[in-house]
Amino acid sequence: MENHKSMKELQNEVDQYISQFKEGYFSPLAMLARMTEELGELAREVNHYYGEKPKKDTEKENTIEEELGDMLFVLICFANSLNIDLEEAHNRVMNKFNTRDKDRWTRIEDAESETNE
């Protein structure tokens, strides 16, 4: 059985891990640099699997899942270091998409009704 964790639980788990170390969280600029580094690694994996630039035989093979996990960890560290509740941030973004951008994209049911006409 899988263990599903809420965003709050994920943020607390990362915070407990980081709290073990005297150095604590990196500065916002260092965190942004780490996030950029992880994004580059994710881009490399996506390009390897779906793009035009396969890896050399000497390059280590990671998975997109691993790289997304690294990105999530750094994102949580970044949010925690600035006392940002990611669940609240997510809710604000979804509210924006469901209000301001609600008619921006073609809904599946709209597309299906157009083809049936």
Image (cartoon, helix red, strand yellow):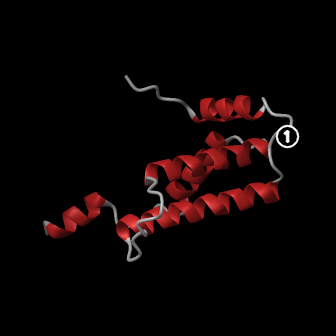
Instruction: Specify few, some or many for label 1: CA neighbours under 10 Å numbering under 14, 14-19, or 20 or more.
Output: few
Q: Quadrant of residue 113?
A: bottom left
Residue at the outermost front position:
58
Q: Quadrant of residue 36?
A: bottom right
Q: How many callouts does the rendering have?
A: 1
Which of 20/110 is in front? 20
Position of residue 67 measured from the top left corner of the image (x, y, whole percent): 52, 53
Position of residue 83 measured from the top left corner of the image (x, y, whole percent): 78, 41
> In the picture, which quadrant includes the C terminus?
bottom left
Q: Quadrant of residue 114?
A: bottom left
For the point 13% across and 66% down, the residue is 116
Residue at the outermost top position:
1
For the point 61% across and 58% down, the residue is 38
Type of amino acid under label 1: Glu
Which of 29/47 is in front? 47
- Residue 15 lies left or right of residue 91; in this view the side is right
For the point 62% across and 44% down, the residue is 73
Please indicate, yes or no, whether residue 103 appears anywhere in the rendered image. Answer: no
For the point 73% across and 49% down, the residue is 78
- Residue 80 lies left or right of residue 111; in this view the side is right
Which of 22/1 is in front? 22
SS class of the residue under badge 1? loop
Residue at the outermost bottom position:
52
- Residue 17 lies left or right of residue 55; in this view the side is right
Position of residue 64 measured from the top left corner of the image (x, y, whole percent): 44, 54
- Which residue lies under the disc numbered 1? 23
Position of residue 23 measured from the top left corner of the image (x, y, whole percent): 85, 40
Q: Is residue 107 above or below residue 2?
A: below
